[in-house]
Amino acid sequence: MRALVFSALCLSALLSGCASKPFMPKSDYPPDPWVKGYANPDDCIGGEKLAAINFELPSYPRRAFRTGRQGWVILRLDVDASGATQNVRVERSLPAGMFGGNTKAAAKKWQFHPPAEPLKHCRVLIRYQLGGVSLGG
């Protein structure tokens, strides 16, 4: 019986160490960029022309979560006639190198309602703040 209780306590202690810890910010969230300030008149901006069918936000990178980092990414992408994303690229991100790759990988899977004509140079802001991910406006 003691062995069973001891085993249960050991398992409980082991599993409690695996539980995710709450996000503890160790950096300030950098002010959002003015996305329209980066745009040309013919560019599409985030939600103005894009209607999502499949739009899963990226997950918070483990390293950034563990170290309490916050930031944002401006993506540029095109949307073809079928609504698929093309030419996904990181235009700017803060901090550099922390969130861009994760965001780009997620955006390549996005699917939008087919536009009347293909959209070029769409800009989308993704925020990584307080341990969560959100779409910028």
Image (spheres, grey):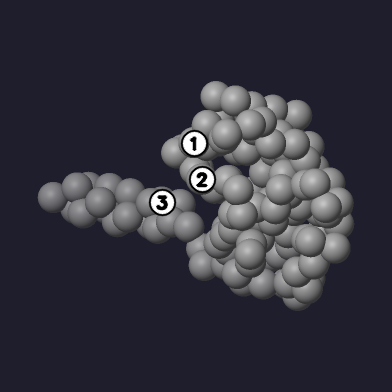
Nearer to us: label 1 or label 3: 1
Q: Residue drawn at (75%, 69%), measured in percent from left and top?
A: 32
Q: Position of residue 41 (x, y in %)?
A: 83, 52
Q: Residue drawn at (72%, 44%), measured in percent from left and top?
A: 122
The residue pinned by badge 3 equals 14
The residue pinned by badge 2 equals 51
The residue pinned by badge 1 equals 113
> Mark 1 vs mark 2: which is more N-terminal?
2
Do we see residue 66 in this rendering? Answer: no
Please state, as top left, top right, bottom left or bottom right, where the C terminus lies in the image.
bottom right
Task: Tell me the distance, in whole angstroms, between the alpha carbons under discs 1 and 2.
Answer: 6 Å
Nearest the eye: 106 or 69? 106
Dot 3 alpha-carbon crowd within 10 angstroms: few under 14, some 14 to 19, many 20 or more: few
- The image quadrant that residue 69 belongs to is bottom right
Asked whether the residues under the numbered discs 1 and 3 touch, taking CB atoms below 8 Å apart as contact, a structural biologist would say no
Asked whether the residues under the numbered discs 1 and 2 touch, taking CB atoms below 8 Å apart as contact, a structural biologist would say yes
Type of amino acid at the residue the image marks with label 3: Leu
Relative to 137, residue 62 above or below: above
Relative to 128, residue 84 above or below: above
Task: Tell me the distance, in whole angstroms, between the alpha carbons under discs 1 and 3.
Answer: 46 Å
